[in-house]
Image (cartoon, rainbow, N blue to C red):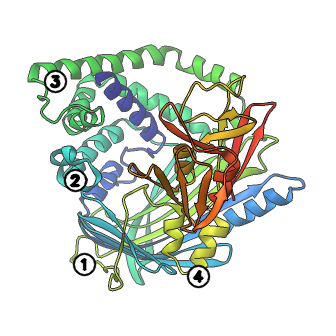
Amino acid sequence: MMKRFKLGLAAMLSLLLVLLAGCQAVGGVDVSKAVLSTLDVKSSMSKQTLSLQLVPTDGKLSEDDRKVIEMLNSFSVTIDQAIMQDTNHASMEGSVQLQGKKLPFHLAMDKKALTLSVEGMTQPVSIPLELEDMDLGVMGPNMNNESLIQTYKDVLGFLLKHAPNPSSISVTPVNEKVNGESLSLQKLHIDIRGDELVGLAKGFLTSVSKDKEGVKQLISRLYDTYYPILEAYAGAPEETAAPSDAEKEKNINEAVDELMGALNELLPDYDKNVAELFKEAPELSEILGKNTVLSLDFMLDSKLNIRKQNMDLTVQIPAIEELPVKQVKVHSEAETWKVNEPVTIHAVDTSKGIWNVNPGEATPGEMLRHVDRQSDLYRFLKDDMNITHKSFMMYTEEDPSELYDSGYEPVVIKNTMMVPLKYVADELDAKVEWNNATKQITLTEDLTGSKIVLKMGSKQASINGVSETLALPVQNIDGYSYVPMRFITKALGAQGNWDKQEQIVTIERK
């Protein structure tokens, strides 16, 4: 557990490093204080736009590449109004644009649930946010907002303390309109080029390596907040006693020593190792080159609240034959007003009821059944996003009549390819029910709701009451039900293919 804790911490520091934009005071503006003040905003209203652009490589594009690039370039998100009432209540209204389709949405959340309505849905969807509803109740005491916000402040404060400024950073007074109101603001402008990141990373790591006490304080804070959560994820019983003060101190000191040791080992050969890395992977010199640029404008009021911001990110893509794109560009603009003033969220209309669903549990069929078939949303999900498409492979042994991995591996019996029923059904989102008294298996196909009924040891089956005869009976192999591939794939709206030479079964639903 402690090893995972240390590795997670190191990974988090590495990830956040590339997001830092410098922390030293510039033009009389305390950048660190301005960044940290964003965590003190308890309420606000805002709006934002976000768009994507892929710049194709020079030369002729294939038709498929052209279509994909055009589709992604048509993508944008507009948030017309976002309201944060407090740390537990927020709402957002806006739209997603893709290939000429505009999909308005309305989202609201409180401590209990996130409710989302998209134009075309027959009912809004409600996703539980209470930890108990997501089987994470053991984490509850450590996951309150105040504790998390303080942890974020401590982490962010540590990172900002050690982050060097990029070469291009400035502050100038400006007059800008925010939600129609003209304001006198300070514009903090930052440009970070890809070829600066290696140097910025070295400066950050060097500074951290000289602050052992600060590292210990940071790890202590993270330990107190996240150790119980990591224990829960590891499956520790709820009654497991918390580490004693001595054990905690020992674990923290070990983590500090390991991290400081890693930094002291890394830094002396940092430049040499970076040079070798670029030599071994020359494409990195393109990605981390001068044409990769993050440009940020933060307009700050007298309280250092960010009232307006613009972001342009350009990532240079190395010239690779398989990639038809040479640059990826992201643009965003945002405005914020009524900072820390009383505001009230806009609730989602639930007068027609709600669709309750747990995260990750909604199947394609369930999603489409909650959408008007004549709506842009239905066509977007089905035609543009292809949410009904499924494809997976299963591997047979060198001798396809032998079976070593029951329940997941197909097998040939009397020249008939037999596949594990439950595994195939799960991959195609079909519901499986077993009647122990009658030895019947009933499957409900996800997209159409068709009922498929089979019986152990029998060649007779039915699809929506229409009788079918299988090539071989349903068989029990090592406790798993096996059925002929051709029957089950057709019944579930898919196609199956066996590549005899490669010994691979491919099942695809388009």
In this view of the protein, can residue 409 be seen by the observer? yes
Q: Badge 4, how many Cα within 10 Å: few under 14, some, many 20+?
A: few
Q: Which of marks 2 and 3 is nearer the N terminus?
A: 2
Q: Is residue 64 left or right of residue 417?
A: right
Distance from disc 2 to disc 3, alpha carbons, whole Å, reads 27 Å
Distance from disc 2 to disc 1, alpha carbons, whole Å, reads 29 Å
Q: In which quarter of the image is residue 307?
A: bottom left
Q: Earlier in the sequence, mark 4 or mark 2?
A: 2
Mark 2 lies on residue: 132
Q: Badge 1, how many Cα within 10 Å: few under 14, some, many 20+?
A: some
What's the residue type where badge 3 is placed?
Lys
In this view of the protein, can residue 289 be seen by the observer? no
Distance from disc 4 to disc 2, alpha carbons, whole Å, reads 35 Å
Residue 196: percent from left, percent from top: 57, 38
Mark 4 lies on residue: 375
Q: Is mark 2 on a helix, strand or loop?
A: helix
- The one nearer the camera, 352 or 308, is 352
Mark 3 lies on residue: 248
Distance from disc 1 to disc 3, alpha carbons, whole Å, reads 43 Å
Q: In this view, does 135 lie to the left or right of 164?
A: left
- Residue 366 vs 221, above or below: the answer is below
What's the residue type where badge 1 is placed?
Val
- The one nearer the camera, 187 or 394, is 394
Q: Which mark is residue 188?
A: none
Residue 386: percent from left, percent from top: 64, 62
Callouts 2 and 1 close, C-beta under 8 Å? no
Mark 1 lies on residue: 343
Q: Quadrant of residue 14?
A: top left
Q: Is mark 4 on a helix, strand or loop?
A: loop
What's the residue type where badge 2 is placed?
Glu
